[in-house]
Image: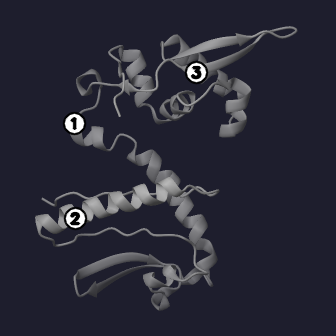
Amino acid sequence: MPRTWMRLDDPHATRLVLNPDYAHLLGLLMTREWTAAGLARHLHRPLNATHHRLTRLRDAGLAVTRAEPRRGRPVQHYRAVSDAFLIPYHRTTLGSLEDLIGLHEDTFNAVFHRAVVQAGLPLVQREEDIAVRLYTTPGGTRMDITPRAGSFDLLDLLRDDAPALTANWGTLHLTREDAKALQRDLQALLNHYGARGGPDAYLYRLNLAPAD
């Protein structure tokens, strides 16, 4: 879909957009108008801290306000100045392209790890059974985390009464043609289920890259 990209060359604006907290806040402002109080409730954050961040986004030229008249002080509604921002790599303070790729990895990892723990806790029968396992498989060695010592099989997560939880990673040995087919299949699955919608939120990550 064609977009009109707003290029950011200002160092201050660039730093804010590359900060995960501000990027999340700006992302919300890109979808609709928000008041400071509404955002604070949505994010479960103090009103003063939310208002401070909104003011910084506005002062950096990333957000605008619309005053809603009322008795007393008007209510300020905030919205992003664009729905598509472009931050050139050479305008950032990142030290490498690897840093660029992993820009928000730590933030997502922290959220994802908490979600995995919460979803997996019902699988634990005894706390002392939680363990790290290192073992051989037909494809090589594997390391995972088990909630039930040696009796747990990752395929147990596919049962209907198990949480909708998958956390797999590793190395596959494929032809380039099969790797491209897998890439397309994964994207097609994501598009299919993303279009269906539903009441519950699920975190996902699809990564595939040629190994060195």
Where disc 1 sits, the SS reads: loop
Measured as percent of width and height from the top left, residue 27 is found at 51, 32
Real-space CA distance between mark 1 and mark 3, rounded to the nearest whole angstrom: 32 Å
Q: Quadrant of the C terminus?
A: bottom left
Question: Of residues 11 and 42, which is closer to you in this image?
Answer: 42
Of the two numbered discs 1 and 3 on the same chain, state the one appearing first in sequence. 3
Of the two numbered discs 1 and 2 on the same chain, state the one appearing first in sequence. 1
Q: Residues within 10 Å of mark 2 (few under 14, many from 20)?
A: few
Measured as percent of width and height from the top left, residue 65 is found at 62, 13
Residue topped by disc 2: 181
104 shown above or below 194: above
99 shown above or below 6: below
Q: Quadrant of residue 178?
A: bottom left
- Residue at 60%, 28% in the rendered image: 32
Q: Residues within 10 Å of mark 3 (few under 14, many from 20)?
A: many
The amino acid at mark 2 is Ala
Of the two numbered discs 2 and 3 on the same chain, state the one appearing first in sequence. 3
Residue 209 seen anywhere in this rendered image of the structure: yes
- Residue at 70%, 15% in the rendered image: 76
Residue topped by disc 1: 96
Where disc 3 sits, the SS reads: strand
- Residue at 73%, 27% in the rendered image: 37
The amino acid at mark 1 is Ser
Question: Of residues 96 and 71, which is closer to you in this image?
Answer: 71
The amino acid at mark 3 is Arg
Q: Quadrant of residue 133?
A: bottom left
Would residue 87 be found to the left or right of residue 127 on screen? Answer: left
Residue topped by disc 3: 79
Would residue 125 be found to the left or right of residue 97 on screen? Answer: right
